[in-house]
Amino acid sequence: MPRRIVDISVPLENTVHADPPGYGPQIEYRDHQQTASEVTSFFPGLSVDDLPDREGWAIEWIKLSTHCTTHLDAPYHFASTMDGGKRAITIDEVPLDWCFQPGVKLDFRHFADGYVATAKDVEAELKRIGHTLSPLEIVLVNTRAGARYGQPDYVASGCGMGREATLYLLERGVRVTGTDGWSWDAPFVHTKARYAQTHDAKLIWEGHRAGREIGYCHIEKLNNLEALPAAGFQVSCFPVKVKAGSAGWTRAVAIIDA
């Protein structure tokens, strides 16, 4: 059966509006000419003229957080505990079978930026697409943010998943979720406005904090979700194994058997 692989990740790159100020990566690109002398330093007596076309190797030096580009958040990112008090697992401890499972896509692009999705919203969308959740399915949320990636308003774009919407998924056995937004929760600029009105700290990071009750992971900064069907595909999102880390970068892909 023909198989199609859809890239649902964003690239790691400089000068793109993918993070708040001060949180983005810094990539230094060194080309073949710049590194030729580095190559010769490993081999006494070798000169740059001895190298083919006087070229060394291409290499990049990168400074970034584990939350730059498309990444998988571990329960440890959300809090020090999960599952009602157990020690939260770090990214190198995430079960690998969580990271390669059938996928489901919820289309929430119609919700306004900053909207906090509810359990009823999730239930209504599952009913619309005719899908009943199964344990370990990976649920991806397509928001308005995906279309704004790289633009100045990206970090403020898209809806977020609230506590009750997140728990709705987790209570049905989902352990990995994903969003094309900067955050699984509503963008901070919108939460900030709600907090200013209510001073209710429970509004802050409520979707993430649901992991204190039931441990789970989510993928942030996905892209191209509009290319996926509502169901009938696999998601692969194995994270880089950062020792004791709160997240790991992933080349997330959707695999569709046509």
Image (cartoon, rainbow, N blue to C red):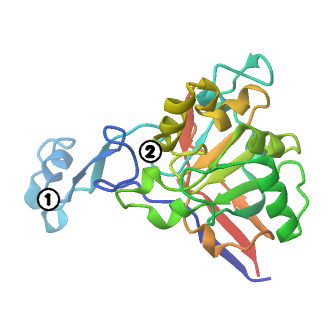
Residue 11 appears left or right of 43: right
Q: Amino acid at mark 2?
A: Cys
Q: Secondary structure at mark 2?
A: loop
Give the mark, 1 or 2, whose residue is nearer the N terminus: 1
Q: Toward which corner of the image does residue 61 lie, by quadrant?
A: top left
Question: Picture coordinates of residue 3 (x, y %)?
Answer: 72, 78
Q: Which mark is residue 33?
A: 1
Q: What is the crowding at mark 1: few (fewer than 14 residues within 10 Å), some, or many (at least 20)?
A: some
Question: Alpha carbon of mark 1 to alpha carbon of mark 2: how far?
Answer: 29 Å
Question: Picture coordinates of residue 216 (x, y %)?
Answer: 73, 37
Q: What is the crowding at mark 2: few (fewer than 14 residues within 10 Å), some, or many (at least 20)?
A: many
Decide which of 53, 243 is in the foreground and name it.
243
The residue drawn where x is 55% and y is 25% is: 199
Q: Amino acid at mark 1?
A: Gln
Position of the C terminus by quadrant: bottom right
Q: Secondary structure at mark 1?
A: loop
The residue drawn where x is 40% and y is 52% is: 18
Q: Which residue, given by chain and number where applicable, does mark 2 sit on? A: 68
> Is residue 75 visible from the viewing direction of this image?
yes
Decide which of 37, 160 is in the foreground and name it.
160
Question: Picture coordinates of residue 239 (x, y %)?
Answer: 60, 44
Residue 256 appears left or right of 173: left
Q: Toward which corner of the image does residue 227 lie, by quadrant?
A: bottom right
